[in-house]
């Protein structure tokens, strides 16, 4: 069986459906759990915290960018699932020379839905995947009707020292738009580094401090409030803005509540 991944690579599976799967991305690991692949998934990363029983019970094969290649190879996987942004290219190429590696590349909700459907086909879980896609789509459609009014200018920070924001060409950017925000750094590519003065100059209505990858906490609100005294500063759940698997089912409800709080 041959499949084409999201970076247009064709992979051939030695058997279908695959029986020995390694997942290298947290949001996709959770998706595989919701696709009922408990027996098939053998290894995950140390950042794959959902579901908790997998985090506690599955073998961990390193971090998303610091994989233990020898440990992965010892499983003799018939499928490895990774992501272009979250995994290290050299490590993925090493694995790809030895095993089938299917890569996602997600920038929009549509990309995420395509990925979910394709993993359903790849792993013989089409019925389960279609159900997840329908649920996500319906919830985002309802959200769209509730966020047609004037958008809120927002800066979404993912890192501190230096400050880094989500810019264009990111999944977070697409989620901000769907949640009713206008990304004040939407004209900049990827994840621009910012000086405090640059953040102050754009005068966002709200600064959203993500829980990941940098763990912003209550103590950081005062720091940002000093830089942008006219902005509201809030902590937000980074998983619901950046995870592009089945967790997307929960995102529209969260976005709706957040938007209502700010309006």
Image: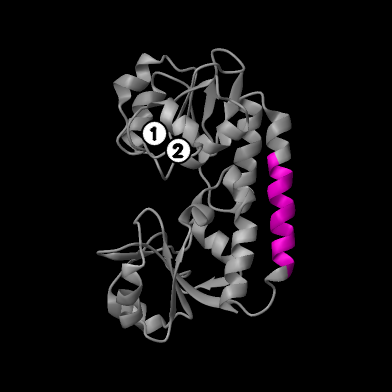
Image position, residue 259 (x, y; %): 60, 71
Lateral position of residue 69 relative to residue 230, left or right: left
Crowding at label 1, few (<14), some or many (≥20) Cα neighbours within 10 Å? many
* Rendered residue at 61%/26% (across/down): 122
Report whether 74 appears left or right of 124. left
Residue 117 versus residue 10 in the image, above or below: below
Tell me the residue at 47%/76% (across/down). 206
Query: Disc 2 designates what residue?
Result: 25
Residue 183 drawn at (x, y percent) = 50, 71
Magenta-drawn segment: 132-145
Front-lying residue, 88 or 38: 38
Res. 178 visible in picture: no
Question: Is residue 163 at least partly visible in the picture?
Answer: yes
CB within 8 Å, label 1 to label 2: yes
SS state under label 1: loop
The verdict on residue 141 being magenta is yes
Instruction: Look at 56% across and 32% down and name the residue there.
Output: 32
Give the label on residue 236, or none: none
User: Is the magenta region chiefly helix, strand or loop?
Assistant: helix
Q: Which mark is residue 45?
A: 1
In which quadrant of the rendered image does the N terminus lie?
A: top right
Residue 260's image quarter?
bottom right
Mark 1–mark 2 distance (CA, rounded to whole Å): 7 Å
Residue 40 image offset from top left, x and y in percent:
54, 20
Instruction: Give the quarter of the image for residue 47.
Output: top left
Q: Is residue 109 magenta?
A: no
Number of numbered discs overlaid on the protein picture: 2
* Color theme of the render: one colour
Picture quadrant where residue 166 is located: bottom left
Dot 1 or dot 2: first in sequence order is: 2
């Amino acid at each position: 069986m041959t499949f084409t991944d999201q970076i247009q690579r064709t992979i051939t599976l030695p058997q279908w459906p695959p029986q020995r799967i390694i997942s290298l991305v947290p949001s996709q690991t959770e998706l595989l759990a919701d696709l009922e692949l408990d027996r098939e998934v053998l290894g995950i990363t140390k950042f794959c915290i959902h579901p908790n029983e997998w985090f506690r019970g599955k073998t961990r094969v390193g971090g998303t960018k610091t994989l233990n290649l020898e440990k992965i190879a010892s499983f003799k996987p018939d499928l490895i699932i990774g992501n272009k942004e979250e995994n290290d290219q050299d490590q993925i190429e090493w694995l790809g020379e030895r095993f089938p590696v299917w890569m996602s590349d997600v920038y929009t909700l549509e990309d995420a839905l395509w990925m979910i459907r394709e993993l359903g086909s790849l792993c013989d879980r089409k019925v389960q995947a279609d159900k997840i896609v329908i649920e996500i789509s319906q919830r985002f459609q309802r959200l769209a009707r509730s966020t047609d009014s004037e958008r809120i200018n927002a800066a979404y920070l993912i890192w501190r020292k230096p400050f880094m924001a989500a810019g264009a060409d990111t999944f977070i950017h697409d989620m901000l738009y769907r949640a009713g925000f206008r990304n004040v750094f939407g004209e900049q590519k990827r994840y621009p580094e910012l000086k405090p003065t640059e953040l102050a100059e754009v005068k966002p209505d709200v600064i959203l401090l993500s829980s990941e990858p940098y763990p912003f906490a209550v103590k950081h609100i005062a720091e940002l409030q000093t830089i942008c005294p006219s902005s509201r500063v809030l902590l937000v759940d980074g998983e619901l803005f950046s995870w592009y698997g089945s967790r997307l089912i929960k995102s529209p409800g969260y976005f709706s509540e957040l938007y209502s709080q700010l309006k």
